[in-house]
């Protein structure tokens, strides 16, 4: 069997995690597709890059050869590839429907399990499955590391890749789970990882931090993040979304990785698309509502939601829209329109009552 893969999205997950993982499992024919013409041109010319994987207090460096890198406007014979991975973002994967129609197997690593159902419907291709890259990875390490190692350096944890069982073949060491186990892992990823990760980023932005580990080194931010992840973990257990043992294991793992100063996990990358992350069916708002299963109010998550509402980054398209909406409508109505939290909902007032200052 030909062991070749095509990865849509040559960014943090695609280039930083999936390619090195597949390479270490024997895949030597690795190709990418990306919309960034400059990146495509430069990586095509270079033909390889270095991926750094954290091992304890050091990096393991892996040279990844690039078979081919396409621009999204190029003609691609998609049926030539054994496995196609999608990691371009939940809002962008639907632009790839024309490619996925004829793919043998597509694995959506889009941090949104609903993308699978939608992509199957849009493409008519039933061989589309969900993947959970349970990992923190970065394609924006500091300049001194790029100069020392490689201009296209990526940094990643070893992490684990969790896949939905399906009609495809990958090595058994890559975990392929039944629906129950997959859903338990996804709920922990969505709530115990995604929500506190985003909260850390929004608080870190307000404190003018560059990386997640910088934010976690600030005592006030660390206390809020610890409080939020405790609120969420207890709610996950109370809602029977995961076993107590697995949820607590997951929480401890997340706190450790947030503090890892080898990862250089960018605040701007984690905080991007604040409207999507504040929407009624996404990590922060769902966490708030889930915590109604707890005895105590989710004060720390509410503080994180307020920080997300205040996200002001002119380089982020959604942030600019959010800023405009707040000026036009006011914060209470923005929470109603974006988050689905009505003005008379006590959660609306709880969020707006939070005062965030002097985080350093």
Image: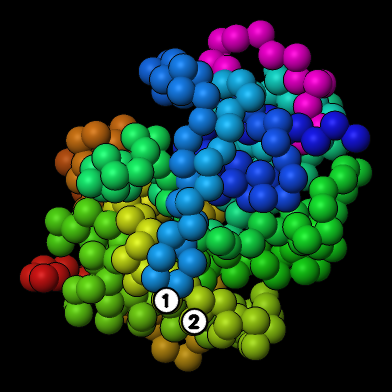
CA gap between label 1 and label 2 equals 5 Å
Q: Is any part of residue 214 visible from this angle?
A: yes
Residue 4: image quadrant is top right
The residue at 56%/61% (across/down) is 158
Q: Residue 126: give x, y in percent of width and height.
A: 86, 36
Task: State which region is magenta.
Answer: 70-83
Which label number is shown at residue 167?
Answer: none
Front one among 121 and 103: 103
Instruction: Estimate the x, y position of residue 78 in percent, counting from the top left.
Output: 75, 20
Q: Is residue 344 left or right of residue 79?
A: left
Instruction: Identify which residue is drawn at 47% across, 91% down.
Output: 295
Callout count: 2
**Residue that appears at 33% across and 56% down:** 264
Q: Position of residue 110 (x, y in %)?
A: 59, 44
269 or 77: nearer the viewer: 77
The residue tagged 2 is 252
| Pointer 2 local density, CA inside 10 Å: few below 14, some 14–19, many at least 20 | few
Q: Is residue 75 magenta?
A: yes
Which image quadrant: the N terminus? top right
Assess disc 1: are there few (<14), some (14-19) or many (≥20) residues with their C-alpha within 10 Å of its C-alpha. Answer: some
Q: Are marks 1 and 2 in contact (CB under 8 Å)?
A: yes
Residue 279 screen position, x and y as percent = 45, 50
Q: Secondary structure at mark 2?
A: helix
Note whether 291 is above or below 34 in the view shown: below
Is 81 magenta? The answer is yes
Q: Does any portion of residue 123 appear in the rendered image?
A: no
Q: Which mark is residue 255?
A: 1
């Amino acid at each position: 069997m030909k062991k070749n893969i095509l990865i849509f999205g040559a960014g943090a997950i695609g280039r930083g995690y999936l390619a090195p993982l597949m390479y270490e499992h024997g895949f030597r024919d690795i190709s990418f597709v990306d919309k960034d013409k400059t990146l495509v041109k430069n990586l095509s010319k270079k033909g390889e890059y270095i991926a750094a994987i954290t091992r304890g207090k050091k990096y393991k460096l892996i040279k990844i050869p690039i078979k081919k890198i396409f621009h999204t406007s190029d003609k691609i014979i998609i049926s030539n590839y054994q496995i196609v991975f999608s990691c371009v973002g939940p809002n962008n994967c639907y632009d790839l429907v024309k490619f996925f129609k004829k793919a043998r197997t597509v694995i959506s690593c889009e941090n949104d399990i609903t993308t699978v159902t939608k992509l199957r419907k849009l493409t008519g291709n039933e061989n589309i499955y969900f993947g959970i890259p349970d990992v923190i990875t970065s394609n924006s390490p500091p300049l001194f590391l790029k100069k020392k190692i490689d201009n296209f350096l990526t940094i990643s944890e070893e992490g684990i890749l969790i896949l939905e069982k399906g009609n495809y073949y990958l090595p058994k060491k890559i975990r392929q789970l039944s629906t129950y186990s997959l859903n338990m892992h996804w709920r922990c990823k969505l709530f115990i990882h995604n929500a506190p990760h985003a909260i850390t980023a929004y608080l870190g932005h307000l404190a003018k931090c560059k990386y997640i580990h910088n934010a976690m080194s600030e005592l006030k931010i660390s206390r809020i993040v610890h409080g939020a992840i405790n609120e969420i973990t207890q709610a996950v257990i109370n809602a029977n979304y995961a076993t107590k043992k697995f949820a607590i294991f997951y929480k401890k793992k997340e706190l450790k990785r947030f503090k890892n100063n080898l990862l250089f996990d960018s605040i701007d990358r984690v905080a991007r698309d604040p409207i999507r992350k504040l929407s009624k069916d996404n990590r922060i708002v769902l966490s708030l509502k889930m915590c109604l299963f707890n005895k105590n109010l989710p004060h720390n998550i509410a503080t994180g939601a307020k920080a997300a509402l205040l996200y002001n980054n002119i380089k982020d398209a959604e942030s600019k829209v959010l800023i405009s909406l707040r000026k036009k409508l006011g914060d209470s109505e923005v929470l109603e329109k974006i988050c689905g939290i009505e003005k008379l909902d006590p959660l609306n007032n709880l969020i707006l009552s939070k005062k965030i200052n002097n985080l350093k």
